[in-house]
Amino acid sequence: MLDETTFRRHCDRAMEDLKKRLIEAEEEGGFEVEEQNGVLNILFEEPPGKFVVTPNTPPRQIWISALSTSFKLDWSDTEKNFVFAKTGETLPVVIERVIKEHLGARPITLH
């Protein structure tokens, strides 16, 4: 398991990168991004919805709450990113997929 300092460094970098990518895609993507105390909220008007991306220090994971599901991502030295073990997807790829599933036909690209 990563020590807390290393986790926070990786997490801060991954969350900042994700936030930048989401902000760039906001207008075409049909959503809005807000950051509150290190937590990213992705808000949708049509169809209504809210996704939450949260760093979780005790288990050293980034948690995503989206589509009535919780995704728990662990750091991967190989990918140099947080990865959803079930699918092998990196953080930006998981977010891209769940946004696309929520919005339907409107694809976005974050990676």
Image (cartoon, rainbow, N blue to C red):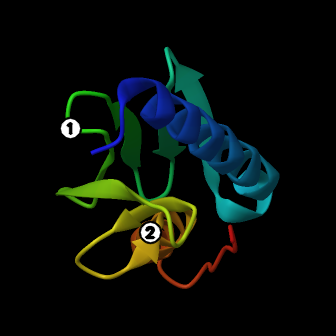
Mark-to-mark CA distance, 2 and 1: 19 Å
User: Where's residue 39, x and y in %?
Assistant: 46, 28
Image position of 75 (left or right of 69) = right
Where does label 2 land, which residue? 94
The answer to which quarter of the image holds residue 50 is top left
User: Where's residue 93, x and y in %?
Assistant: 53, 72
Q: Nearer the viewer, residue 79 or 97?
A: 79
* SS under mark 1: loop
Q: Is residue 93 above or below residue 87?
A: above
Image position of 77 (left or right of 109) = left
**Callout 2 amino acid:** Val
- In the image, what residue occupies the spot 27% across and 72% down? 85
State the quadrant of the N terminus: top left
Q: Is residue 40 visible?
A: no
- In the image, what residue occupies the spot 51% across and 72% down? 78
Where does label 1 land, which residue? 59
Q: Are dots 2 and 1 in contact, CB under 8 Å?
A: no
Q: Is residue 48 above or below residue 89?
A: above
State the quadrant of the C terminus: bottom right
**Callout 1 amino acid:** Pro
First of labels 2, 1 by sequence position? 1
Query: From the viewer's perspective, is the residue at label 2 or at label 1 nearer?
Result: 1
How many badges with numbers are in the image?
Answer: 2
User: Where's residue 88, x and y in %?
Assistant: 37, 80
- In the image, what residue occupies the spot 63% across and 80% down? 107
Q: Is residue 40 above or below residue 62?
A: above
